[in-house]
């Protein structure tokens, strides 16, 4: 009986994984549970072709973070990495690998715009190199006087999407799970890419979502062909 109890306890612990245990601002009491899309291989190939054609917006949730992690202290500057949750070593490596895959697949990037939080700027830097900062992409900060909640963060992301001038390549926004979910309905894992088409009047169409690991097999084929 003791072994059975320990087994059940371990199973319960595994279900409550560290990633799930982190605060998820996209989950609010009474809100509908979002549908997480798991792309099939053929679907990934289509999304890659659409990204290669350009003219889209790629919204990226920052890469994997430390578990356990410190709480974000919004009384400190957004660039103070000692006062917030940061990328883990795996997250830093994963961002770099996704960047390699995007380049191997010849996916054109016109601009990379990031939230000022360290976990987003580090994702942008490791994935793409150069980036600019947009304060409205920051994580919701309801605990700070005058701070806005996740709904306000989603509205600001929608404003940004409506302001983007679509070029020949793709525009990248690196932000946070709650902001992206409220604006698009996409519930992204850490490091996952949401692919959007934004019309001139600001209407947003969700094409799909992919992880770096979804792109990897296609990137390897592209690299072999280029040799």
Image: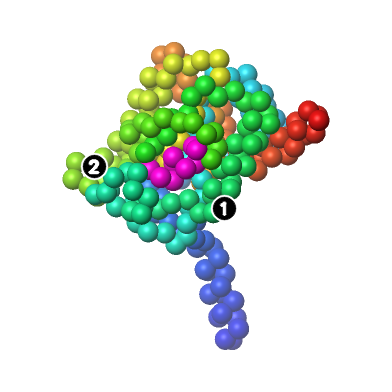
At horizontal 35% and vertical 44% (from top left) the residue drawn is 79
Residue annotated with mark 1: 90
Residue 9: x, y in percent? 53, 75
**How packed is label 1: few (under 14 Cα within 10 Å), some, or many (20 or more)?**
few
At horizontal 71% and vertical 35% (from top left) the residue drawn is 219
| Residue 181 shown in magenta | no
Helix, strand or loop at label 2? It is: loop
Q: Is residue 83 left or right of residue 145?
A: right
Residue 175: x, y in percent? 43, 38
N-terminal-most mark, 1 or 2: 1
Q: CA distance from mark 1 to mark 2?
A: 31 Å
Farthest residue toward the left? Answer: 145
**How packed is label 2: few (under 14 Cα within 10 Å), some, or many (20 or more)?**
few
Residue 142: x, y in percent? 26, 46
Residue 136: x, y in percent? 33, 33
At horizontal 75% and vertical 37% (from top left) the residue drawn is 220
For the record, the magenta segment spans 117-125
Residue annotated with mark 2: 147
């Amino acid at each position: 009986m003791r072994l059975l109890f320990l087994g059940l306890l371990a199973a319960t612990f595994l279900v409550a994984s560290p990633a799930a245990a982190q605060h998820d601002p996209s989950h609010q009491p009474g809100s509908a549970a979002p549908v997480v899309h798991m792309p099939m291989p053929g679907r990934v190939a289509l999304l890659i072709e659409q990204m290669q054609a350009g003219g889209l917006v790629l919204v990226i949730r920052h890469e994997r973070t430390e578990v356990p992690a410190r709480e974000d202290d919004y009384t400190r500057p957004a660039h103070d990495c000692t006062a917030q949750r940061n990328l883990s070593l795996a997250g830093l490596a994963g961002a770099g690998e996704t960047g390699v895959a995007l380049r191997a697949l010849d996916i054109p990037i016109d601009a990379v715009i990031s939230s000022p939080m360290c976990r987003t700027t580090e994702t942008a830097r490791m994935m793409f190199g150069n980036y600019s900062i947009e304060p409205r992409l920051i994580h919701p900060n309801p605990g700070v006087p005058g701070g806005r909640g996740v709904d306000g963060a989603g509205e600001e992301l929608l404003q940004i999407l409506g302001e983007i001038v679509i070029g020949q390549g793709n525009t990248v926004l690196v932000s946070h799970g709650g902001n992206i979910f409220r604006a698009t309905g996409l519930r992204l894992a850490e490091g996952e890419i949401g692919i959007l088409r934004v019309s001139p009047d600001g209407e947003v169409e969700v094409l799909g979502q992919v992880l770096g690991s979804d792109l990897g097999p296609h990137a390897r084929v592209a690299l072999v062909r280029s040799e």
